[in-house]
Image (tube, rainbow, N blue to C red):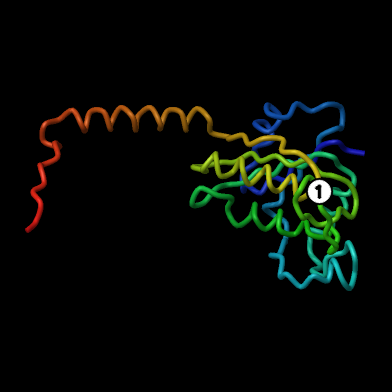
Amino acid sequence: MKQILVLNTLEKDVSGQINTFIPEQEGEVEIVNTSHMKIAHCIGCNQCWLKTPGVCAIKDDYEAIIRKLVDVQNLWIVSDTRFGFLDYRGKRVLDRIMPMLNMYVEFRNGSLRHQLRYHPLDVGLIYNGDGDRQLLEEWCERTAVNLGGHSLGVLTLNEHETESLKFKSLKFKSLKFKSSKFKRKEETPCM
């Protein structure tokens, strides 16, 4: 049984970078590159809950991923970001996880949650691009709670680039407002 499954939705191979975040421990980590796989969007038909419990009605490459998810304890999703959130590939991979849950709900830690079909799943996110880190951390935590697990955290592939951009942005802002040309004019009330 693998302990960690990493679903890389990026078009480029970032296995080396992923291994720096998640050190491989003798077959404990499996990285699956999903960019070349045929994975459709969840259509919300609920057949994985009602008609064929635990089995998605869409027959594509995601079937192999769901089988792997049943055997792991930790899931990491590697995704690009758009508008501060996961891009469509990352969102699509996670939306198709519904067969892991039951349609029945229960109170868990004071909140109403779907019952787990198999076991709790801890979830983490490694993102590329300009993601809203606070939003992604909250999303990761809520997703993990819905899957009965804990958040493994949110990491970025471009930490040094992000810090560099923040520094340049702050430097530019401080220069901009020191100039007298940008002083705000006193506004007079209209009468």
Query: Residue 125 or 14: which is nearer the viewer?
Result: 125
What is the residue that sits farthest to the right in this orientation? 1
- Is 120 left or right of 163, judged from the image as shown? right
For the point 64% across and 39% down, the residue is: 126
Up-down: is 46 above or below 116? below
Residue toward you, 176 or 12: 176
Please give the name of the residue rendered at 60% of the width and 57% of the height, measured from the top-left corner: 88
Q: Quadrant of residue 134?
A: top right
**Label 1 neighbourhood size at 10 Å, few (<14), some (14-19), many (20+)?**
few
Q: Using the image as rendered, state which of residue 180 and residue 35 is in the foreground.
A: 180
Type of the residue with mark 1: Arg
* Image position, residue 165 (x, y; %): 40, 32
**In this figure, which residue is indicated by the disc labeled 1?**
108
Horizontal side of residue 96 vs 118, given as left or right: left
Element carrying mark 1: strand
Query: Picture coordinates of residue 50 (x, y %)?
Result: 87, 71
Between 129 and 179, the one lying in front of the other is 179
Position of the C terminus, as image quadrant, is: bottom left
Name which quarter of the figure residue 5 lies in: top right
Q: Quadrant of the N terminus?
A: top right
Q: Is residue 39 left or right of residue 170?
A: right
Residue 20: image x %, image y %?
Answer: 68, 26
Residue at image x 11%, y 36%?
181
Left or right: 84, with 147 as reference point: left
Q: In the image, is residue 175 above or below residue 144?
A: above
| Residue 91, horizontal then vertical, whole percent | 65, 55
Q: Quadrant of residue 176?
A: top left
Residue at 79 percent of width and 69 percent of height: 58
